[in-house]
Amino acid sequence: MKKAVAIVLCLFLACMGAVSSLAVWNAGANSEAPKMSVQKATQAWQPDGVINDGEYYAFTPDASMFSFVETNADSSNTDTSNAEKVQFKTYASYDDSYFYFAVDVDITSLPFGFVQDQGDNPGNMWQDQAVQFCAAPATTDAPGSADSDRTEYGFGLTSDTNTQIFTSWAEYSGQVAALDAQAGTDYSVTKNGNDLIYEIRMPWGAFLPANITTGGAFGFCFVVSAGDQASDGGTLLHIQFAQGCTGDPGKDASLFGQISLEAAPVATTTAAPDTTAAPGDTAVATTAPSTAAPTGDNSTLFVILAIASVVVLGGVVVVARKARG
């Protein structure tokens, strides 16, 4: 884990668009360019707030693959304990045209509740409750090479008007198919009881020079923003898979998670035993054991990120909060 301390003047941060002069940075031991895989979808993607098997599969990074940013109005916080309380489940899949990703946030775990009041200025949604999505080509560079060429989008749901919002902060320089984001078509954010469910599809060409398929790879990072900066005096909470979007060391695609594409899971079936009576025997009525797969619900597929209890993260670093999360 990389550790550094940077104390930055308020004037500098005002120029960068940050609200607070200091932020606490806490990076997991394996959060620099962690490796993960995603399986190919077997069902059509629907942006409807429902997570179906085959449409998605559980995306379950180890807790040590996450990093955190936290700051409050007077920079008096000394750790990232509030950010580490946030719980969510993540899912992913792909096909020949798109990468699909979903986040299911537990509203009851949000330290400041569900707040997103940036409907008039979606570019600032990172201050409240939202999801930031970063992607780039796979890299062979050493982590920390300061490669800022990436696609970075954000999407959310306003808590005051129930309006879906979207913004683009960066577009990959070699993209061939920018996302024309349409709510209900390319992304959706659904509030269902105590769940906030974020779904998005990204055309490969939005962050790659060409489509990829099974056996390919790309760089990926996401941030769950869970603060109340605009409405509660300046509290900012970011929970980030990998590094390179928020916190130290800023925008750096070489620190994104490196995602490999795997084939769809192979369906397995169990044949019923042969109950045919042998010649001369008396046939006895039998019942074959059920071969139906347990139905269950999707809760068996997710990981709840109650990272406050994880001790592997260690180390707190105080750094400047960059503009646009």
Image: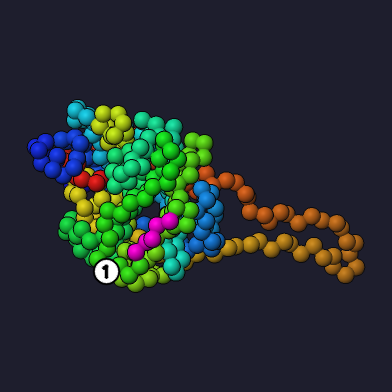
Whether residue 3 is visible, yes or no, is no
Q: Residue at x 32, y 33 (%)?
A: 228
What secondary structure do most residues of the magenta stretch adopt? Answer: loop
Q: Nearer the viewer, residue 243 or 231?
A: 231
Q: Residue furthest front?
A: 120
Q: Quadrant of residue 107?
A: top left
SS type, badge 1: loop
Q: Residue at x 58, y 63 (%)?
A: 267
Please state if 294 lies on the left or on the right of 309 as rendered.
right
Q: Quadrant of residue 130?
A: top left
**Relative height, residue 39 to residue 90 (above, below):** below
Q: Residue at x 19, y 28 (%)?
A: 74
Instruction: Check if residue 258 falls in the magenta segment.
Output: no
Q: Nearer the viewer, residue 265 or 91?
A: 91
- Which colouring convention does the figure follow? rainbow
Residue 311, x across and y down, in percent:
30, 37
Please state if 29 lies on the left or on the right of 110 as rendered.
left
Which span is picked out in magenta?
A: 178-182
**Relative height, residue 232 to residue 300 (above, below):** above
Total marks placed: 1
Instruction: Check if residue 180 falls in the magenta segment.
Output: yes
Please state if 281 lies on the left or on the right of 187 as rendered.
right
Q: Label 1 amino acid? A: Gly
Q: Nearer the viewer, residue 208 or 187?
A: 187
Residue assigned mark 1: 174
Residue 315, x across and y down, in percent:
21, 38
Residue 291, x across and y down, in percent:
68, 56
Q: Residue at x 47, y 64 (%)?
A: 40
Local packing at callout 1 (Cα closer than 10 Å; few below 14, some 14-19, many 20+) is some
Please state if 29 lies on the left or on the right of 302 as rendered.
left
